[in-house]
Image: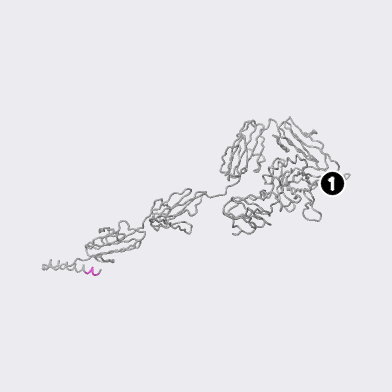
């Protein structure tokens, strides 16, 4: 640079000297020509994107800065780094300090040498600067909108905005990718991927994770395609096929709940007021326990709301109609059929009041459509109905006659043609005076007395078959002056016993009782024995009055001879006087089996059927026998499908990777339990024994020990 400055100074001085001499008239002499002066050339490779930048002239590679004579041909050789290319408008050659005054540079491709970029220009008669700039190569990103979800791509360069399919992204750019399934769907494992072709080879672009869980990939220098798939989330199909409520109304009248509705009761008789039109349309409304179940009413599908509610209509014909509601659970297998018979009462009806007399009990019934209908006190009965009266005398009492509206009636049948309400009772007489010693022989004490000098309650150990302990609210106000007793009688009448067993047959099948299982049939009556001592002669009189409890009482039944809870599956069927059948078992969580007795809670007294089936001994080899050991890989080696089953003392354990429903039954077929299984571990307490466990279409046999 110093050399260059000195040469220019010499030239300027020479010109100045010659000019001065000419002005002074001094004669000048011609001097020889000097060689043309060179001009400065500067260049520098950019920091980003350059693999190499070379400038040469006359076969020599130049370094910056350098000087060249005007007219020299200069070659620019440019090789961008991988993923980069020459930016548009480059290289630029311009007068140093004046970028707007450019020097043309000619592109000369040389395919044989493999040089990416080759340019030439002619050195002008002024200093020049060569400038080069690179840019990242843009590649295309494509993707399709997936079914049952969305796929979104974005970059940090444009936060909040998404990349559209077919958009270009510079290589090395961090691209965020988000796959979002619709409700009820999940991403197919391993289906989210990014790939592209380089020649004939398909490359998979690695997906990476940020600390916050965000998925991203680095854009390569070639076109890529992103894809993802979604699938439905599999859930256990419900087997719930019950109604939780059922009501009806006539026209625009008030909604009336179905009398005595229970989810477990399948058949109902509804008497409509005699003011109801014989061809009226009735609207049924109710609620399904599971809104995903399907409903047919008289064979026609009924729309069920997301909440599980529904409405349907039935029409009366000649004053009667039958509604058959079939509920099919989500699993398509479990079904329940509810039947409701509607009947418009005749123009006239009367009410029957039944007064239970001292010394015995009476019952009233009538026959309708070939079936016996029990009449409870306060029931309305159509005029013209023939009532059948029956009685049972308590010990030491003898039946005398019935009384209807205080008039004696010797016959056991009565047909009333009028519209007056009826009050029916009966008269019994004592066979003889009952001594205090004989009082103890009337039934079983309902509330056992404590033995003198002994704490606790004395539970009788004699052959009495049943003990009843009423709740405090069920006892008469004068309990302390009287004695509540239970009169239990085996049913001797073959016809009556056969009728009761027939009624129990359907309930027994529901409870899984084998047809040939041993059974005991008994009738029960709760009575109040009151002894009065005369104030004059110290004589005593005893009155025995039946008690009809309106509150729940606890019933304790000693085991039949040779039967115990560890060796038998036990089910109790209660045939209530209102026609409803209750089934008590451990699986229904309403039967308690103690060491000395069975215990249930009831609200009325009527025939009971106690069934007991011996528990199975040897284990069936067709089912895997899970050990009573903690959960280990060894004990569950044969378990597949995400379900593990094992046992511990008096407990069943199930571990599942998804929601499911478990059924537990005894080997006799009696259902023990039905419960929901949640993801993780579920523990269910069960008494010792051998059970079949059904869950997720798999069946296991387990042995539970104490």
Q: Which residue is mark 1?
A: 438
Q: Is residue 303 above or below residue 81?
A: above
Q: Is residue 47 above or below residue 344?
A: below
Of residues 206 and 73, the one nearer the viewer is 206
**In the image: residue 276, left or right of residue 225:** right
In percent of width and height, residue 557 lies at 75, 49
Check residue 3 for magenta coloring. Answer: yes
Instruction: Identify the secondary structure beneath mark 1.
Output: helix
Check residue 440 for magenta coloring. Answer: no
Looking at the image, the residue that sits furthest to the front is: 621
**In the image: residue 570, left or right of residue 136:** right
Of residues 53 and 587, the one nearer the viewer is 587
**In the image: residue 86, left or right of residue 368:** left
In percent of width and height, residue 248 lies at 62, 37
In percent of width and height, residue 357 lies at 79, 39
- The image quadrant where one finds the C terminus is bottom right
Q: Residue at x 49, y 52 (%)?
A: 188
Of residues 49 and 378, the one nearer the viewer is 49
In percent of width and height, residue 272 lies at 66, 34
Q: Residues within 10 Å of mark 1 (few under 14, many from 20)?
A: few
Q: Is residue 1 above or below residue 106?
A: below
Displayed quadrant of residue 332: top right
Of residues 326 and 379, the one nearer the viewer is 326
- The image quadrant where one finds the N terminus is bottom left
For the record, the magenta segment spans: 2-6
Q: Is residue 403 above or below residue 1?
A: above
Most common SS among magenta residues: helix
């Amino acid at each position: 640079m110093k050399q260059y400055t000195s040469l220019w100074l010499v030239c300027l001085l020479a010109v100045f000297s010659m000019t001065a001499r000419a002005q002074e008239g001094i004669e000048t002499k011609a001097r020889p020509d000097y060689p043309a002066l060179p001009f400065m050339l500067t260049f520098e490779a950019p920091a980003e994107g350059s693999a190499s930048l070379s400038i040469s002239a006359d076969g020599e590679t130049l370094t910056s800065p350098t000087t060249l004579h005007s007219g020299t041909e200069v070659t620019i050789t440019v090789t961008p780094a991988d993923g980069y290319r020459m930016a548009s408008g480059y290289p630029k050659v311009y007068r140093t300090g004046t970028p707007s005054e450019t020097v043309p540079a000619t592109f000369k491709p040389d395919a044989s040498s493999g040089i990416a970029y080759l340019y030439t220009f002619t050195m002008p008669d002024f200093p020049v600067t060569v400038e080069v700039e690179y840019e990242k190569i843009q590649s295309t990103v494509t993707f399709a909108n997936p079914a049952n979800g969305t796929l979104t791509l974005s970059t940090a360069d444009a936060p909040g905005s998404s990349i559209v399919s077919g958009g270009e992204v510079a290589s090395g750019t961090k691209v965020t990718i988000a796959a979002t399934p619709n409700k009820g769907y999940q991403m197919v494992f391993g289906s989210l991927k990014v790939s592209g072709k380089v020649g004939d080879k398909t490359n998979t672009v690695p997906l990476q994770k940020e600390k916050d869980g965000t998925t991203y990939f680095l854009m390569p220098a070639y076109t890529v395609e992103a894809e993802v798939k979604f699938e439905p989330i599999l859930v256990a199909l419900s087997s719930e096929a019950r109604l939780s409520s059922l009501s009806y109304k006539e026209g625009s009248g008030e909604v009336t709940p179905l009398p005595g509705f229970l989810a477990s009761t399948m058949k109902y008789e509804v008497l409509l007021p005699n003011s109801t039109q014989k061809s009226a349309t009735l609207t049924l409304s109710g609620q399904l326990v599971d809104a995903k179940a399907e409903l047919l009413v008289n064979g026609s599908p009924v729309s069920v709301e997301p909440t599980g509610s529904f409405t349907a209509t039935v029409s009366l014909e000649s004053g009667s109609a039958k509604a058959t509601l079939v509920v099919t659970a989500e699993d398509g297998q479990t079904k329940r059929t509810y039947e409701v018979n509607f009947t418009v009462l005749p123009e006239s009806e009367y009410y029957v009041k039944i007064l239970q007399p001292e010394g015995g009990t009476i019952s009233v019934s009538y026959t309708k459509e070939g079936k016996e209908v029990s009449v409870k006190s306060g029931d309305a009965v159509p005029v013209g109905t023939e009532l059948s009266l029956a009685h049972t005398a308590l010990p030491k009492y003898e039946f005398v006659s019935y009384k209807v509206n205080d008039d004696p009636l010797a016959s056991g049948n009565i047909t009333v043609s009028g519209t007056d309400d009826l009050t029916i009772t009966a008269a019994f007489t004592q066979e003889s005076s009952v001594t205090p010693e004989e009082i103890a022989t009337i039934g079983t004490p309902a509330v056992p007395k404590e033995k003198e000098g002994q704490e606790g309650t004395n539970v009788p150990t004699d052959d009495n078959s049943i003990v009843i302990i009423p709740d405090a609210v069920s006892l008469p106000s004068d309990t302390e002056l009287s004695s509540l007793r239970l009169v239990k009688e085996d049913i001797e009448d073959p016809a009556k016993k056969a009728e009761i067993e027939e009624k129990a047959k359907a309930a027994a099948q529901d409870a899984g009782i084998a047809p040939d299982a041993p059974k005991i049939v008994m009738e029960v009556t709760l009575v109040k024995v009151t002894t009065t001592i005369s104030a004059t002669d110290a004589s005593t009189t005893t009155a025995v009055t039946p008690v009809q409890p309106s509150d729940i009482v606890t019933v304790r039944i000693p085991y039949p001879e040779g039967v115990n809870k560890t060796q038998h599956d036990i089910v109790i069927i209660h045939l209530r006087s209102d026609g409803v059948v209750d089934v008590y078992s451990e699986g229904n969580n309403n039967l308690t089996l103690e060491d000395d007795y069975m215990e249930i809670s009831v609200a009325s007294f009527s025939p009971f059927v106690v069934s007991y089936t011996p528990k199975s001994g040897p284990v069936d080899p067709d089912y895997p026998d899970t050990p009573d050991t903690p959960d280990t890989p060894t004990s569950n080696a044969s378990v597949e499908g995400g379900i593990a089953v094992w046992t511990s003392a008096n407990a069943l354990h199930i571990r599942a990777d998804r929601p499911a429903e478990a059924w537990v039954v005894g080997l006799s077929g009696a259902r023990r339990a039905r419960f929901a299984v949640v993801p993780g571990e579920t523990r269910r307490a069960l008494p010792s024994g051998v059970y079949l466990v059904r869950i997720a279409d798999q069946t296991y046999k387990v042995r539970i020990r104490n």
